[in-house]
Amino acid sequence: MDGQTEMFERYGVAMYQAQVLEHRITQTLGVARTAAKQFRTREEASRDFQTNYTATLGTLLRYLRPHIDDPGLEAELTAALETRNRLAHHFFWEHQENMDSDEGLSVMTEDAYDAQLQFQAIITKLFPVMGRFLDTIGSSPDDFVEGLSAALEEELREQHS
């Protein structure tokens, strides 16, 4: 595999992990709001989830912050937002001089890999946060995510009928 292909693959995986992080935040936020009894009906909860799935990472973090009681995790989430925005909006401009050499492509590949690891670490750290809220409502992460997926699929089918 050539350096450019490897760099683009690594960049793609990093951006994928950024999207996984967005979804994990959306799920955590939904569980937190459910535990706080912010929804009167299942439809309200569903609408909130769907709205959040279209929100930007910055907006999601703003919504999630009141539910996070760990200043270190808050700082990591803020850093992840900055990394995601840099990758999405500035990565190639920052590295334009690196595109023309194997050494430069290695620097770009490493940069994208570091971002991927950053996102993965935070995704993992959100599981206990979600678990705390799930304990409040008497559910497990696996049951909640599976139930949420099924409910959203059912609603999408109904909308397209």
Image (cartoon, rainbow, N blue to C red):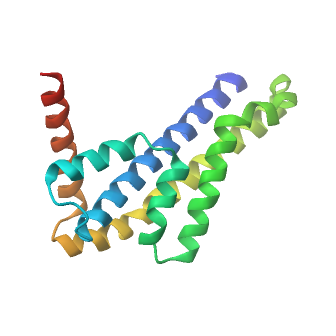
Q: Where on the picture, by quarter, is residue 78?
A: bottom right
Nearer-the-camera pick, 56 or 127: 56
Using residue 150 as the reference point, say whether residue 73 is left or right of it: right
* Image x and y of residue 49, in percent: 30, 48
Q: Is residue 31 above or below residue 43?
A: below
Nearer-the-camera pick, 50 or 12: 50
Q: Residue at x 40, y 47 (%)?
A: 23
Using residue 11 as the reference point, say whether residue 157 is left or right of it: left
Q: In this view, does 67 lie above or below 97?
A: below
Q: Where on the picture, by quarter, is residue 157?
A: top left
Nearer-the-camera pick, 7 or 40: 40
Q: Residue at x 42, y 63 (%)?
A: 126
Nearer-the-camera pick, 52 or 6: 52
Q: Which residue is drawn at 46% across and 50% down?
A: 21
- Classify the position of the C terminus by image quarter: top left
* Image x and y of residue 46, in percent: 23, 47
Using residue 73 as the reference point, say whether residue 68 is left or right of it: left
**Total residue callouts:** 0
- Classify the position of the N terminus by image quarter: top right
Q: Which residue is drawn at 45% across and 71% down?
A: 66
* Image x and y of residue 6, in percent: 64, 28
* Image x and y of residue 58, in percent: 55, 51
